[in-house]
Image (spheres, grey):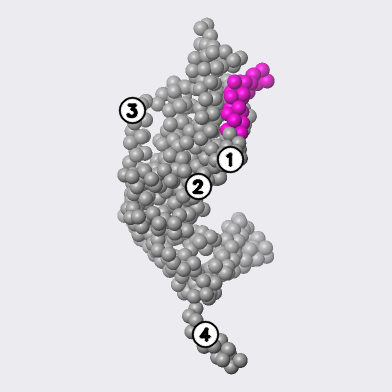
């Protein structure tokens, strides 16, 4: 337990000290503030209500995107980087169980993401309290503006002064001071309405007994924010599990793919009725539509029952546990021993290898989906699905050998992209001569040729050639036995 808490604490401190962590939060602040003028363009007889609803939906989407970026960048910064730089060896050698290491990393990253999400949520609720100024007669909500700007300025001042005078770390100081100042600002705004008068929490004006007004910040809105937080925790678990095997870029792409595909979960459920293999995909992907209460927000008469929220919490907890179990299993087989620099994938070559594996995985999934309709489509499903499946498995194995530094894998991959580039260039040339041959495929041919050219450039990089032994690294040259050069030098010296 002590080791777990120590890893959690160190991970949390490392995360909030990352400059990208504060940058993401500040960008989200700016985007949330910009949604106020952007939301005032709905067309309706009751445009004040529709503009405000649009502001709420945009804000919730921004909070989800903020959580995605915070989770991906934080997990890759404190986990993937430690694995790539071999610093994780010092922790594993304590000894610390790998499961404890992964769980501690998740707890630390989740804590940092929770604080970042909390700060973004406060700014979101402040924009909701300000309301959209849909008409020229609408007035500014000065308590919101004054308190929000004051909190931001005080946070910046404390971070800069603390760094210059006391030597405090600027980013972590900004996080802690922002946590205090923005909380205080929100508490003031909660009880002070427009015109600097005391109001009931949730209202921006004193309720009129003859014309009752609805509160601006409602319990349903706060519940919707809490559901978004559950989705962010799911994405955080995915980011930590992906970081055990991937770098920052691939972790970000993986989290983005889960975010998009998880939002399309109901469509996959409909597709699974005709394609049985899609059922497995519906179990593997999280149903993120549970956590985006857009429909409930659109209808004022619809509420979000606490029983439903409880089921969503249970669903998120079970999914997080499953993803972390998969991440621990992946980390158990991860090689952490110190190796030569040319033996590991990094940079553009790593992105190329993962892109190839993604292509192979797509072919495998497509083949399995087609074969799952064998009883309905008959022989046509077998003749289409089996080649897709075999091609996907073959590509997966090829990219695996490529990643291990096999020279024949390098040659096959190079030939594949040369053929793709030649096919694209030749196709574009023929279309310029005969537009009737397929002008609608010009974009696909161009993109395919460009991607093939980029891949060939990556294969031509010195680091790539070093990985396959075509170029010796400086470490290898320095490690050459002295016997290779010693006798000749000795002979020359003796001769002199």
Which residue position holds label 3?
307
Residue under label 4, please give it: 486
- The alpha-carbon separation of the residues under discs 3 and 4 comes to 79 Å
Q: Position of residue 195 (x, y in %)?
A: 61, 14
**Which segment is the magenta one?**
132-157
Which comes sooner in the sequence, label 1 or label 3? 1
**Residue 464, percent across and down?**
53, 68
Label 3 and label 2: CA atoms lie apart by 33 Å
Secondary structure state at the residue bearing disc 2: helix
For marks 2 and 4, the one nearer the N-term is 2
| Residue at 49% over, 72% down | 468
Tell me the SS state at disc 1.
helix
Q: In the depicted view, which residue is nearer to us: 311 or 450?
A: 311
Residue linked to disc 2: 73
Whether tag 3 and tag 2 are in contact, CB under 8 A, the answer is no
Q: Which mark is residue 163?
A: 1
């Amino acid at each position: 337990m002590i080791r777990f808490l120590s890893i959690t604490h160190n991970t949390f401190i490392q995360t909030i000290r990352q400059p990208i962590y504060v940058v993401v939060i500040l960008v989200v602040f700016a985007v949330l503030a910009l949604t106020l003028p952007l939301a005032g363009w709905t067309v309706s007889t009751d445009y004040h209500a529709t503009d405000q609803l649009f502001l709420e939906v945009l804000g919730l989407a921004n909070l989800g995107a903020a959580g995605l970026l915070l989770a991906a960048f934080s997990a890759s910064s404190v986990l993937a980087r430690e694995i790539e730089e071999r610093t994780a060896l010092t922790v594993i050698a304590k000894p610390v169980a790998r499961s404890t290491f992964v769980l501690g990393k998740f707890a630390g990253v989740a804590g940092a993401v929770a604080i970042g999400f909390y700060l973004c949520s406060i700014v979101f609720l402040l924009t909701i309290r300000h309301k959209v100024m849909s008409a020229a007669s609408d007035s500014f909500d000065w308590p919101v503006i004054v308190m929000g700007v004051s909190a931001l300025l005080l946070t910046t001042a404390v971070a800069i002064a603390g760094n210059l005078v006391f030597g405090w770390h600027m980013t972590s100081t900004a996080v802690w001071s922002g946590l205090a100042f923005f909380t205080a600002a929100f508490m003031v705004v909660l009880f002070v309405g427009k015109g600097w008068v005391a109001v009931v929490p949730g209202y921006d004006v004193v309720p009129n007994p003859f014309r009752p007004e609805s509160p601006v910040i409602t319990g349903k809105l706060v519940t919707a924010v809490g559901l978004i937080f559950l989705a962010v925790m799911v994405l955080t678990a995915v980011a930590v599990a992906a970081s055990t095997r991937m770098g920052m870029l691939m972790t970000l792409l993986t989290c983005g793919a889960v975010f998009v595909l998880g939002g399309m979960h109901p469509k996959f459920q409909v597709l699974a009725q005709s394609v049985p293999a899609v059922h497995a995909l519906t179990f593997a992907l999280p149903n993120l539509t549970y956590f985006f209460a857009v429909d409930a927000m659109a209808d004022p008469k619809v509420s979000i029952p606490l029983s439903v929220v409880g089921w969503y919490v249970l669903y998120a907890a079970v999914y997080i546990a499953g993803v972390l179990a998969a991440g621990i299993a992946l980390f158990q087989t991860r090689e952490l021993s110190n190796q030569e620099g040319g033996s590991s994938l990094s940079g553009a070559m790593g992105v190329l290898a993962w892109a190839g594996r993604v292509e192979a995985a797509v072919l495998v999934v497509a083949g399995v989906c087609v074969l799952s309709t064998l009883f309905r489509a008959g022989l046509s499903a077998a003749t289409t699905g089996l080649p897709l499946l075999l091609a996907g498995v073959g590509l997966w194995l090829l990219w695996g050998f490529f990643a291990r530094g096999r020279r024949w894998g390098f040659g096959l991959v190079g030939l594949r992209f040369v053929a793709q580039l030649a096919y694209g260039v030749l196709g574009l040339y023929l279309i310029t001569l005969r537009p009737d041959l397929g002008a609608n495929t010009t974009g696909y041919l161009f993109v395919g040729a460009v991607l093939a050219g980029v891949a060939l450039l990556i294969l031509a990089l010195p680091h790539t050639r070093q990985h396959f032994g075509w170029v010796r690294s400086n470490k290898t040259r320095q490690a050459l036995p002295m016997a290779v050069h010693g006798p000749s030098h000795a002979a020359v010296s003796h001769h002199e």
